[in-house]
Amino acid sequence: MLSFKTTETLRLGVESLLLHPGRSVLTMLGILFGVCAVIATLSVVEGISHKMQEEVLKMGATNIIVQAVRPPESQTTTSAAAASDALAYGLTYDDAERIQSSVKGAEVIVPARKIPAMARYYTRRTRVEVFGTVPWYNETYGIQVASGRWLTPTDLHKTDNVCVLGASVAGALMPREEPVGQTLWLGEYAYKVVGVLKARGMGSGGKAGKTQDYDRAVYIPLTAASRRWGQVLTDRSAGGHSHEICELHEITVKLASAQQVHPAERIITHLLEKFHTTSGKDWDVLVPLERLEALERTKWLFVVLGVSIAAISLLVGGIGIMNIMLASVTERTREIGIRRAMGAKRRDVVEQFLVETVVLSTLGGLAGVPIGAGLATVIPWGLTRVATTLGIGGEAALSSLSQTIVTPGAVILALGTSVLVGVVSGVYPAYRASMMDPIRALRHE
Amino acid sequence: MSLAQLINLRKVYQMGAGVEVVALQDISLTIEAGQYTAIMGPSGSGKSTILNLIGCLDRPTSGQYILGGEDVSRLSDGELSEVRGRRIGFVFQSFNLIPQLTALDNIEVPLFYQRIHRRQRRHRSLELAEQVGLGARARHKPMELSGGEQQRVAIARAMANDPLIILADEPTGNLDSRTGQEILAIFGDLAARGRTVIVVTHDESVGRRTHCIIRVADGKVVSQTAN
């Protein structure tokens, strides 16, 4: 019985609407515009937010990036730099090491150098990959020493020409001798062998995911690699030339989870403040996560703003519906009287008009969603055209708007609101209709 | 047992500012099943008020109304609507059909409020349309029908729920004399088949065709005579 009533009332409501198509469409328009506004606003905001998040995520959400900054004043810190004519600034391997040991669970990535070269020992030669790296590299990647030792921080500081051989290299160049203590040639310089590694085989350790033959590598201190193969930057601009020595331009600190980011940031900042004594700040700490969080907050601001505007639009739409329905009820006074005379209860009358209103608002909502989505795509394009035509500029920024995302959440919100508006704005007219005195209604007009 | 009993019915309207209008002073009537009755009286005599009360469109201020053995004097609006839908069939002077619906849809309206399913409704309305002689015209809208045809639709609609009483308010008032006669013939036919029909009118020629005339004046029954 209940299902009969619902479907029949629904049918009656829909049929009534079809009998007055013009008025029905007019009523729908208010809600349609409101829903359009909601969808368009939310989609554009979501699109911008998503684009910006992508940018930040490229930097790594759980990363902290420490960068060297060229200070305005020429201050020097290292004695080596003071001895020469060069400006020394920026990050050092010491910084990187301090960070690695102070921040638990962090993976400190420092630009390493990989240089293919020819290794020579007396008459023997073999192709190797020279790996300029840092002392803690072996811990991070689980490299084990077969004989001798791995690189030490001292090697790094003294930029010694020492090297650690991969298993195959040792075998190829010094099959019959103990490699440790011997001297071989890499490129133009001689290096003393301080250690040999256990066999590791092939693996995908490279940044680009390329496989590398660990056993064909020769590990030397990063500083040595830089010095021998060049890291001094020379600037020959107008009037003499200046030399800059920047050990490290960038240190990337990779953390395991987002919770570790803020504590790690504090530690890193503290370390850098303590150990960098130049009068101008020669470092900067970038925290992508903070930027992400700031974006989230900004996005929600815009969402609230946009939804508020759209809510006003829906309110106006709802008032429009109420007005039109009230007019409709007055126009159909006779009809209401007739139906009541034929046995309709007040409840039947309320249901009939309420169904009509809700069907109208829901249809308006359903139509508004695709139109709103379409509008969301057109708006950025339109704005770009306007900017170009008026010569305002900012097209690049506007192009970031070009991606609009319609989330299911936005659709549900918009549709749900349109149904709600239909119910709320339809209740009063329906009530008015039901409370009419049948006798007077029958005499009307 | 009589079909309907009006016992000491009184109807007073409150017009506001303490002004009262006594439409019915004291009405006592009995309607037997199968009776073809006319309620007659001048304008303002209260005959419309009696019609509204018999038709359960209104409630008496005091007194009793017993319809089909049920006291309907103090029912709630919902209950009254239910009784009205099931037990009464209305025919109005100005037809009162819903303009946007076809004749068949109009006939079905009372059935809809009795929760009759679509197919059954259609079956019944076609049947009724036949009975009142509409035929193919039944698929047209009221605007496309003549006065006489519209009134036939109204009669079919009044019959839809197989009511206890058919109540007609000046049914020939908006029709020419010839069509009026046709319509009255239908009523006579219904009465002959045992329907209880009450016609409210001021037209003597209409009253003459009934079996019983109840005359009303100043809110009181003046006489009740058989024809």
Image (cartoon, rainbow, N blue to C red):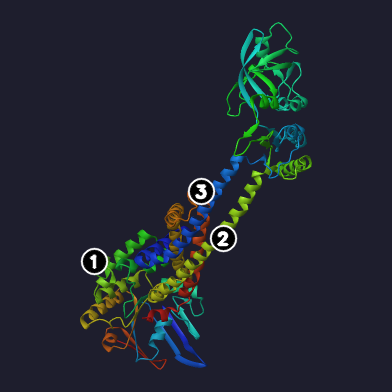
Q: Position of residue A89 (x, y in %)?
A: 71, 38
Asked if badge 2 and badge 1 are on a common chain, one would say no
Pick whichever, B94 or B74, lies toward us. B94
User: SS for tag 1?
Assistant: helix
- The subunit carrying tag 3 is A
Q: Which mark is residue A400?
A: 3
**Residue at the disc numbered 1:** B135
Q: Is residue A241 visible?
A: yes
Foreground residue, A31 or B123? Answer: A31
Q: CA distance from mark 2 to mark 1?
A: 63 Å
Q: Mark 3 falls on what kind of element? A: helix
Would you place residue A262 above or below residue A191 in this image?
below
Q: Amino acid at mark 1?
A: Gly
Left or right position of A231 against A45: right
Q: In this rendering, which labeled residue sits more in front, label 3 or label 1?
A: 3
Q: Which residue is mark 2?
A: A305
Residue A185 % position (x, y): 67, 15
Disc 2 vs disc 1: which is toward the camera?
2
Q: Nearer the viewer, mark 2 or mark 3?
A: 3
Disc 1: host chain: B
Q: Amino acid at mark 3?
A: Ser
Residue extending furthest top?
A: A176
| Mark 2 vs 3: CB contact within 8 A | no
